[in-house]
Image (tube, rainbow, N blue to C red):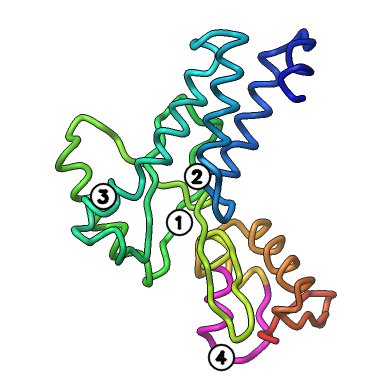
Amino acid sequence: DVISVFKLLDDKDSFRGHYAKLMTHRLLTAIGFDCRREQLVIDELSAVCGGGYTSALQRMLSDRLGSTDLTATCLGIAKTALQNECTVITSGSWPVNPNPYPFTWPESIAKDIDTFTNKYMAINKKRKLEWLPQLSRIEVLCDDCTLVMSAVQYAILRQLFDGPNAFVNADSIARQSQIPVEVVAQELETAGKMGLLIVKTGANNRVGYQVN
């Protein structure tokens, strides 16, 4: 099994680094996660290498498991009525980087973010809260499917879906959203390959996109 192979590894710190990155994806951006299985692996790793080896992994799981109660408290909403959920992650425990550029949250979730921030900072006056939109997950209900994307992807696509039904290039969206043009271009290309957008090459080989 995995633990038997793990015992044979010489560089167990490298394994922990890769495992923490995969765990971050499962806990924050994947749809659903099995907390029992996550805890089982942490316990088995701890039995081999000690609690110090798994302390950051345990902190990550604890942060995620407490997110629903924390969000309900800060938004003043019953857990069963939550539409948005916030996860406060402990700095130094998660393998994440600060958001590298300014970001304006979509209006549909900005109000909850402001409410959560104000309440959380009122309770935890000595803490600093920094939002990480690149690690967010937004579920968009369509006619026959549910699209899952980050807040950055959502903000880019909203510029197209809310605007006039015309071809738009990455430069114009980048100017309006303040998201770097290379990020916008990459996300538009991905959306085009998924069939969400029509792709057209115009003058000077400039690529434009339109809602499909």
Tell me: 158 left or right of 110.
right
Sequence-wise, which precedes: disc 1 or disc 4? 1
Q: List the residue tagged with mark 4.
A: 164
Residue receiving disc 2: 99
What's under tag 2, amino acid-wise?
Asn
Pointer 2 local density, CA inside 10 Å: few below 14, some 14–19, many at least 20: few
Say few, some or many: other residues with alpha carbon within 10 Å of mark 4 (under 14 / 14 to 19 / 20 or more): few
Residue farthest along the bottom direction in this orientation = 165
Whole-number angstrom distance, CA of label 3 to CA of label 2: 17 Å
User: In the figure, 16 relative to 125: above or below?
Assistant: above
Residue 165: x percent and y percent? Answer: 61, 91
User: Residue 4 is drawn in which quadrant?
Assistant: top right
The residue that disc 1 covers is 103
Of the two numbered discs 3 and 2 in the rendering, the one whose residue sits closer to the viewer: 3
Does label 3 or label 2 sit earlier along the sequence? Answer: 2
- Disc 4 vs disc 3: Cβ atoms closer than 8 Å? no
Q: Position of residue 62 (x, y in %)?
A: 40, 33
Tell me which segment is drawn in magenta.
Answer: 156-169
**From mark 1 to mark 2, how far is it between C-alphas?**
8 Å
Q: CA distance from mark 3 to mark 1?
A: 16 Å
Can you identify the residue that label 3 sits on?
Answer: 117
Residue type at mark 1? Phe
